[in-house]
Image: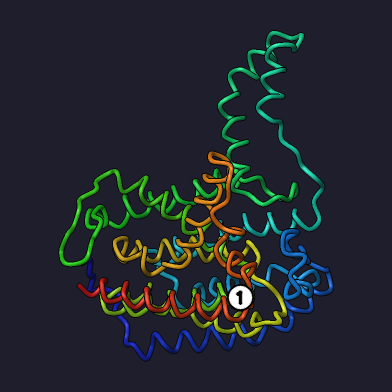
Amino acid sequence: MLTILQGTADLAYIISFMLISAVVAFAWAPFLTRILYHFKVVKGAKTELAAVGSHAYKTSTPVMGGLLVIVTIAVVTYALNWSRSFTWVPVGIMIIAALLGAIDDLLNIYGTERRSRKIGHVWNLIKVHKEWRMRLWYLISLPWTAFKRLSVWFGSRTRRGVFVHEKLLLQFAAGAIAAYWIYAKLGPAWHFVYFPFGFDWNAGWLIVPIVIFIVMFTANAVNITDGMDGMTGGMLIITFSALSLISWINGFGEIAILNATAVGALSAYTYFNIKPARFMMGDVGSLGLGALLAVNAMAIGEIGSLPFLGFMFYVEALSVIIQVISKYLFGKKVFAMAPLHHHFELKGWSEEKTVMRFWVIHFIFVVFGFWLALH
């Protein structure tokens, strides 16, 4: 287990940051609400769920409510918990991922339709284009075209916003920053992957691709989960609370305070996001908080318990992967709709029942992950 004695903080002091963050977030939430409604920052409900009555009001509910959490965390941390050793990189990566999400949210609302060439179209251009230079270019770029088209399978049906392959590239850059920080700046102890009960693996330079993958996968997992009122906020409160306690127990005071700050801001956000929501998180919140979750867990050496600390987020992401593979390779769906929460909704569960049951399941596995982190 990775421990550090510097930067330790009293538990009461850590909890005070949770309260400060909640007060700050509640204080400026009305201002954010007015801005979002004034500029009609509305994306609308998914086409596939138009027939579900519980989603009718969401066509007029603003997105980008996640700004409440992102801005509060950034301001409180910069003002009261700024540490070049442990907090500025996680917050910086959170902001980078949140900016990507904000761009996607805004383009989905205000942007024009975008299209990308299909592989068959590019192949025809290779054969018939009159300029040999262009034929050569299309041939060289064919693998990139294939990657772009394959990535579409995992995206939404909207033709606005940031394409999936563009998201992946920018997320890769954010993950690379995190990997560089962990590998080169935190020291050799962070080159290990720590598993419960003393099973440790010295990953060496392999920690770099591991970190990049975890940042990308976790950010997208939280983003995928954000589809029902209160669900993502509630589950993130559970996860960041556990991370805050683990950080404190292991002696990572600054990270514990950062996690507690996230809990406070998320508490205010979830208050306004409980059905019927005043606003929804949007990509700006889900991508930013997913990246922060991943980086904070890895900064305290909890890669081994992370699958349980973020359990339902990863289950939701895996349900999408399973659905896409089954649909495109075998021609049939495993779920009525992916991600998993929409499957249960279409099977007759109310939104409230789905959210609360997901909260309970997530809580149980987070407690198990917390228990593992102590061994």
Q: Between residues 104 and 256, which one lies in front from this camera angle? A: 104
Q: 1 above or below 274?
A: above
Location of residue 192 by image quarter = bottom left
Classify residue 350 as left or right of residue 199. Answer: right
Residue 262 at least partly seen: no
- Which residue is most to the left? 198
Q: Between residues 56 and 28, which one lies in front from this camera angle? A: 56
Q: Provide residue 258's location: percent of width, then percent of height.
A: 44, 74
* Residue at which label 1 appears: 349
Location of residue 279 by image quarter = bottom right
Which residue is drawn at the image coordinates 51% and 72% (left, top)?
A: 78
Considering the numbered disc 1 on the image, is that residue within a helix, a strand or a loop?
A: loop
Which residue is drawn at the image coordinates 44% and 80% (left, top)?
A: 260
Which residue is drawn at the image coordinates 26% and 71% (left, top)?
A: 373
Q: Provide residue 87's location: percent of width, then percent of height.
A: 42, 67
Q: Provide residue 285's location: percent of width, then percent of height.
A: 60, 66
Q: How is the image coloured?
A: rainbow
Quarter of the figure with the N terminus: bottom left
Classify residue 352 as left or right of residue 206. Answer: right
Q: 104 above or below 345?
A: above
Q: Amino acid at mark 1?
A: Trp
Residue 187 at least partly seen: yes
Q: How many marks?
A: 1
Classify residue 6 as left or right of residue 364. Answer: left
Which residue is drawn at the image coordinates 63% and 61% (left, top)?
A: 283
Quarter of the figure with the C terminus: bottom left
Q: Provide residue 42's location: percent of width, then percent of height.
A: 78, 66
